[in-house]
Structures are given as C-alpha cells and as structure tokens.
Image (tube, rainbow, N blue to C red):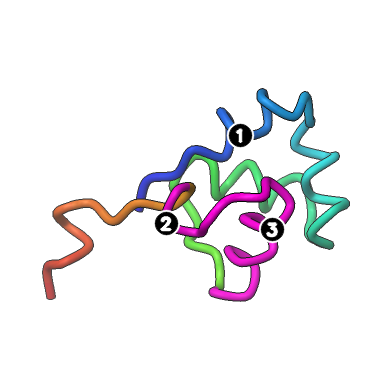
Amino acid sequence: MRNTIKVERAKKDFTQADLADKVSVSRQTINSIEKGKFVPSTLLALKIAAVFEEKVDNIFFLEEEDWED
C-alpha cells in the first residue's frame, strides 16, 4: 500500500513526531507507515486522515500486489 503521509505532513508543516503525537503512536510507527513497512489499522488510518482533513483514500492507495492472494 502506498501513501502520501510525507506530502500531507509537509503541507501542514508537521514532523513525524507531531503527527505521531496527534494520533497517539510513536514516531517510529509513522516512519514505518511512510516507508511502506507497516500497514496501519483502519482506526489509525482514519485518525491520520482526520488530522489531515482528508478522506482515507486520498492518503492511502492500494497497489497491484495488494490484490494478489
């Protein structure tokens, strides 16, 4: 799954730590999500989208391999 968290953070001038504080996770979790190493829970994805005042599907995108079994 791809995401635009880094871009959205830049628009709001947030650091990873700022976003992490707002959604109650560690900075390392935000880093892992940005790098595509961790897929957030639905709840966390919704929180992140709410912070950026965006729809979840404007931030998170499925890739071709996400559809494979």
**Residue at the spot 62% in from the left edge and 55% down from the top edge:** 49
Residue stretch rendered in magenta on the structure: 42-58
The local secondary structure at tag 3 comes to helix
Q: Indicate left or right for 39 with 5 as reference.
A: left
Q: Residue 7, image x and y in percent?
A: 56, 28
Q: Confirm or deny contact between disc 1 and disc 3 (CB under 8 A).
A: no
**Residue at the spot 66% in from the left edge and 56% down from the top edge:** 48
Q: Is residue 55 above or below residue 13?
A: below
Label 1: which residue?
8
**Residue at the spot 61% in from the left edge and 34% down from the top edge:** 8
Please report whichever mark, 1 or 3, sits nearer to the chain's N-terminal start: 1
Which quadrant of the structure image shows residue 41? bottom right
The local secondary structure at tag 2 comes to helix
Q: CA distance from mark 2 to mark 1?
A: 13 Å
Check disc 3: other Cα within 10 Å, few if <14, some if 14-19, many if 20+. few
Q: Residue 17, image x and y in percent?
A: 83, 39
Label 3: which residue?
50
Q: Indicate left or right for 7 with 12 as reference.
A: left
Q: Is residue 17 above or below residue 49?
A: above
Q: Amino acid at mark 1?
A: Glu
Q: Residue 1, image x and y in percent?
A: 35, 53
